Image: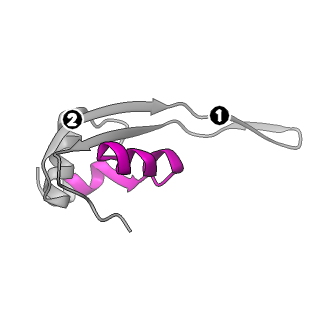
Amino acid sequence: MNESQARELLIAPVITEKGTVLQEKNNQYLFRVAPRANKIQVREAVEKIFKVQVTGVRTVTVHGKMRRLGRAQGRKPSWKKAIVTLKEGETIELV
């Protein structure tokens, strides 16, 4: 996997309160990833881009919520999130 393919799989870091707590306590980072990405591809992409060692990857499909604007109803798109655990002592500078 080259770096351009890795950057296509990792769309963006997810920065939330829960994500910040996971970073501080468990050395875990949240990323929005391509829906077709599997755990092995996510591991390789993070290791390639950030030059760190990954010990675990968990993925979650976040289903889109129903939204309404006046009488019109719609649905936000579903997306995939990856929770990446790094080896102890390694970090990623996201901001």
- For the point 36% across and 50% down, the residue is 23
**Kind of residue at disc 2:** Gly
- For the point 56% across and 39% down, the residue is 77
Looking at the image, residue 18 sits to the left or right of residue 66; the answer is left
Q: Is residue 92 placed above or below 59 in the rendered structure?
A: below
Neighbor class of circle 1 (other Cα within 10 Å; few <14, some 14-19, many 20+) is few
Task: Give the residue number, with chain letter if any, for mark 2.
Answer: 56
Q: Quadrant of residue 71?
A: top right
Magenta range is 6-31
Looking at the image, residue 84 sits to the left or right of residue 45; the answer is right
Please tell me whether mark 1 sits on a helix, a strand or a loop: loop
Q: Is residue 48 placed above or below 59 in the rendered structure?
A: below
Residue 34 at what x, y percent from top left?
A: 35, 43
Task: Give the residue number, with chain letter if any, for mark 1.
Answer: 65
Residue 32 at what x, y percent from top left?
A: 40, 47
Residue 12 at what x, y percent from top left?
A: 39, 56
Is-magenta flag for residue 30?
Answer: yes
Residue 7 at what x, y percent from top left?
A: 26, 57
